[in-house]
Amino acid sequence: MFKSGCVCCGTESDFQEYIRYQNETVFSHYEGTIIGKCVTCGTLKTFPKINAAFDPQENHTRVYEKDIRKFEKLFQPIVDKIKRHKPTGRILDVGCATGILLSLLKKERYDITGIEPNRKEYLKARKRLGSRVVNTTINIYIRKHRKKFEGIIYNHVLEHIEDITNELKSAKKILKPGGIIVIGLPNTDNIIFSLRKKYWEFLMPTQHIWHFGKKQIRELMQKNGFKIIDASYSDDDRFDYPLAKRIYFKCLSFINRLLNTGEAQLLVVLKTP
């Protein structure tokens, strides 16, 4: 048992060791990392929050740009949710990476803005979208700009942020009345994680500080003045896996669908009065 800050209370909470990477061969770069479970809310947290072997300035530019069509397909459900809940308006993508998602929204005639703190990814997004993308964080952005938005996107970003409460507080300041936040993040509440535990590919403990299940993310949103109004779940296709493994994971994905869950959760949240 050890103590650390948790999203459920904003102060120190007790954590029990849940996963330990020790004497690893499969994920040797995670060696020494521990994932603890908050005894109060059940949220999982990585210790240390950044592994010494991980470069926090590492970027995924090559990954995104290598197969743009693949990522356009992955991002389309986000576009569809925004179109369903906000057919028009100004959209902010926090952590927009190289701007592929924003490009899809631009085609749908949204007024787009992107924030990307990683310099290399920002430069690629800037080349793609011009001055619509800013190399900064949301806290700095709101001090310099007075724009308000109908929609804000956090697509696989919140799990990287230590102080999520402060981040959501900042987002609320620039969200128009009736505005939405679209959140994509891994979901630990699924059969694949339950069986694979530390070998689940999407834990990524050298990058992800927080690991949420369906219950934990719902409680986090309620605590910070948001209500989930739309939720959907999906599993990775694992197209590059051998046939036998693909069949195995498809069977697990079928179970996830029966249980209305999956490895990834895509949420639409509304600011409550």
Image (tube, rainbow, N blue to C red):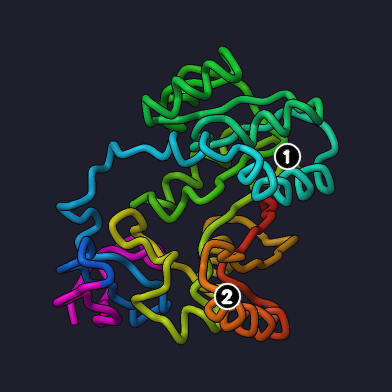
Q: What element does badge 2 sit on?
A: helix
Q: What element does badge 1 sit on?
A: strand
Query: Badge 1: how crowded within 10 Å, few (<14), some, or many (20+)?
Result: some
Cβ atoms at labels 2 and 1 below 8 Å apart: no
Q: Which residue is mark 1?
A: 177
Task: State the extent of the magenta-drawn residues as a range.
Answer: 1-25
The amino acid pointed to by label 2 is: Leu
Tell me what residue is drawn at x 73 percent, y 39 percent. 177
For discs 2 and 1, the disc positioned in front in the rendered view: 2
Tell me what residue is drawn at x 21 percent, y 74 percent. 21
Tell me what residue is drawn at x 49 percent, y 26 percent. 142
x%, y% of residue 77?
73, 51
Give residue 14's quadrant in the image.
Answer: bottom left
Q: Which residue is mark 2?
A: 243
x%, y% of residue 91?
68, 32
Distance from disc 2 to disc 1, alpha carbons, whole Å, reads 49 Å
149 displayed left or right of 164: right
Q: Which quarter of the figure is the N terminus placed in?
A: bottom left
The amino acid pointed to by label 1 is: Pro
x%, y% of residue 175?
64, 37
Q: Is residue 273 visible?
A: no
Reply above or below: 47 against 142: below
